[in-house]
Image (tube, rainbow, N blue to C red):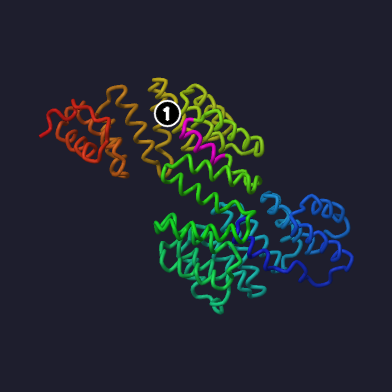
Amino acid sequence: MNKIFLILFSSLSFYNAIGQRTTCRDVLAVAESFMIDGNYENVRKVLNNTRATCSSEVSWFYIQFGYHTGIGNNDSALYYMNFAAKKFPNEDSILYLHAISYGLQYDSAMAVKGLEEINKAAAIKSKLIYLICASQLLRMSNRPAEALELISNAKKIEKNYDAQLEWGIALKDNRKFKEALSKFNKAIALNKFNPAAYLEKAELLLSEMNNQDAALAALDTVESIDSTLADPSLLRASFFESKQDYDNAIAEYDQAIQTDSSVHQVYLLRGNCLIEVGEYDLAEKDINKYKTLHPAESDVNYLLADLYLAKGDFNGAAILMSKMETNGESTYDLYLRRGMAYAANRQNDDALKDFNKAETFPEPTTELYFERGKCYFQIKEYRKAKYDFEKAKSWEADVMEFHYWHCKAAYEAGLKDEACASCKIAKFHGYEPIDKIYLKDCK
């Protein structure tokens, strides 16, 4: 479960419903103790054995929510809370968990539905945890400014850990980094033994404030509080990966898996790093491990296509993407990758068709224009190639490869002044593959 949602869930008493039968309360209390200990198999048995006798109780649905989110099955959690919200439409705590269930789908449209539910809960009973949840869901609905306004105007939150933490995250999402750091430090001062604020602080320091030493110190503190969390290793790995230090990133992903093997996403993250260092067999092993654990997820095939492209199996990449298209997929990533595979096989007409399809999707990336530019260059459509490289370098001016290819295309198109300007920039910044032919006429 998302670490912030987990905090909010743990602050909700399981047994605040009125009129429960003592026998169900006692049995479900045992289930709760199993859940606290992480013994989800016994929780499952209790739930199955009490389906006929206790499923009319609010607490039974609390346990269902905790069980399914605890084992990472957020879809099933939402299924049970959909049912519970219909059964108990005036139970604010059920509406609250229903809202969290929507949030755990990590989809902006679902977050909007969750926001509707938390507003219903708040209308029945005003609670600070409902306001915090509403702020989270606003952020997940891509409305960070509204989230910040909501949480910053809340009352009686100065001494509330969860509120200070959410306030910090809302500030971070609004790019107010110094203020966010202050709120994370305030949360830590309120509760030095909760790892969530340390993790948010470390992520902020690494990703936005370039303070590696303070970030790593915060992660060390998290590990001293709870050595069973994989988050510190994951954050370190992400940092190393951003610096293209793939060996250290892989080592941290290894540690994350040893610490908590239930974080299956690590296999994909490590697989991606293994592709970068050319360890293709190990990468494929990681990707297939994830596919075995999550057979219904099709997105993993995009990473598998990246693997095929990296090791030169262009037919394999194209076939995989075509299978996904046959199964109803139609995405930017599919057409980009298949276009790259076709271009590498010099099937340029098919490649350009796919690149052009990819361009029709919202927010195409520089990668598309770079790859299509190379395809145009390959068929000597130099002016079209120049246009695509121009687009790529205008978006990411610090990527010298874009300047170099723009120089090549402009030169071949007879535009020597443009060619010289781009090649000089690439050469000045130390881009090694500059061909002297493109510089010979430059003054």
Secondary structure of the residue carrying numbered label 1:
helix
Residue pictured at 82% horizontal, 54% vertical: 47
Query: Which corner quadrant of the image does residue 325 belong to?
Result: top right
| 253 to 86, vertically: above or below | above
Q: Residue 328: x percent and y percent?
A: 57, 33
Q: Residues within 10 Å of mark 1 (few under 14, many from 20)?
A: many
**In the image, is 332 to the left or to the right of 283?**
left
Q: Residue 371: x percent and y percent?
A: 37, 32
Indicate the quadrant containing the C terminus: top left, top right, bottom left or bottom right.
top left
Instruction: Report the front residue among 26 and 151.
Output: 26
Residue denoted by label 1: 340
Instruction: Report the front residue among 113 and 442.
Output: 442
Question: In the image, is residue 279 part of the stretch drawn in magenta?
Answer: no
| 10 to 357, vertically: above or below | below
**In the image, is 53 to the left or to the right of 61?**
right
Three-letter code for the amino acid on which mark 1 is drawn: Met
Residue pictured at 80% horizontal, 72% vertical: 18
| 270 to 164, vertically: above or below | above
| 249 to 159, vertically: above or below | above
Q: Residue 78: x percent and y percent?
A: 68, 54
Q: Residue 170: x percent and y percent?
A: 48, 64
Question: In the image, is residue 269 part of the stretch drawn in magenta?
Answer: yes
Magenta region, mostly helix, strand or loop? helix
**In the image, is 222 to the left or to the right of 15?**
left
Instruction: Report the front residue among 128 and 4.
Output: 4
Q: Which region is colored magenta?
A: 268-278
